[in-house]
């Protein structure tokens, strides 16, 4: 197993649009294990392959307190959205920044598991937030994109300053 490096905003690689997963092989199984290790270690409730510079439509999540509900979604598609909810989101790629984002309350998602088996999942609450947040990553989108341009610019400056300080430390 290996912990992977997480890209941070405004790294342009986070804007890459992921390609479909086509090979459900041993390399994919290893990537899934590494995504979980990286996510649990962070700690986070979800992680998209985009965040570790792998541009495939693959995400993992686990919103349980006990880390006993791991989910793998390859090639996810939202088939139905119902209602709205607002949740204060954070992102491992935008560390230390939190902001309210409005998303669907319930999503019906079709995806494939790590072996390529198709399944349908109806998610609500935090799981629905997390899946929508991770699917945005696969499309090259970040939660700060929902903020005003001024706020997003403030976030960019703050993180770039922190990156400079980390580089010179
Ligand atoms: O760990 C995470 N917590 C979180 C909290 C509210 C809304 C979304 C998330 S996802 C985030 C991990 C992450 O950045 N995944 O891409
Ligand atoms: Ni994120």
Image (tube, helix red, strand yellow):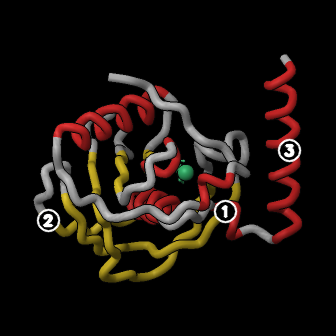
Measured in 3D between alpha carbons, the distance from the residue under mark 1 to the one under mark 3, in whole angstroms, is 18 Å
Q: Which of marks 1 and 3 is nearer the N terminus?
A: 1
Residue 100: mark: 1
Residue 158: mark: 3
Residue 118: mark: 2
Q: Is residue 129 visible?
A: no
Dot 1 alpha-carbon crowd within 10 angstroms: few under 14, some 14 to 19, many 20 or more: some
Image spot of residue 27 (x, y percent): 24, 38
Q: Viewer-proximal residue, 150 or 62?
A: 150
Residue 125: mark: none
Dot 3 alpha-carbon crowd within 10 angstroms: few under 14, some 14 to 19, many 20 or more: few
The N terminus is located in which quarter? top left
Q: Which of marks 1 and 2 is nearer the N terminus?
A: 1
Q: Do the residues labelled 3 and 2 touch (CB within 8 Å)?
A: no
Q: Residue drawn at (46%, 57%), measured in percent from left and top?
A: 134
User: Residue most toward the top?
Assistant: 169
């Amino acid at each position: 197993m290996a912990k992977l490096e997480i890209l941070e905003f405004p790294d342009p690689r986070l804007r890459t649009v992921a390609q479909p997963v086509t090979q459900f092989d041993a390399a994919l199984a290893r990537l899934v294990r590494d995504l979980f290790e990286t996510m649990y270690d962070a700690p986070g409730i979800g992680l998209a392959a985009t965040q570790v510079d792998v541009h495939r439509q693959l995400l993992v999540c686990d919103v349980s307190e006990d880390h006993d509900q791991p989910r793998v979604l390859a090639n996810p598609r939202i088939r139905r959205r119902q209602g709205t909810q607002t949740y204060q989101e954070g992102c491992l790629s935008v560390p230390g920044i939190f902001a309210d984002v409005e998303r669907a309350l319930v999503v019906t998602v079709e995806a494939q598991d790590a072996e390529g088996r198709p399944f349908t999942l109806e998610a609500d609450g935090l799981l629905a937030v997390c899946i929508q947040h991770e699917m945005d990553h696969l499309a090259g989108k970040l939660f700060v994109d929902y903020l005003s341009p001024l706020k997003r610019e403030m976030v960019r400056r703050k993180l770039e300053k922190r990156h400079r300080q980390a580089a010179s430390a």
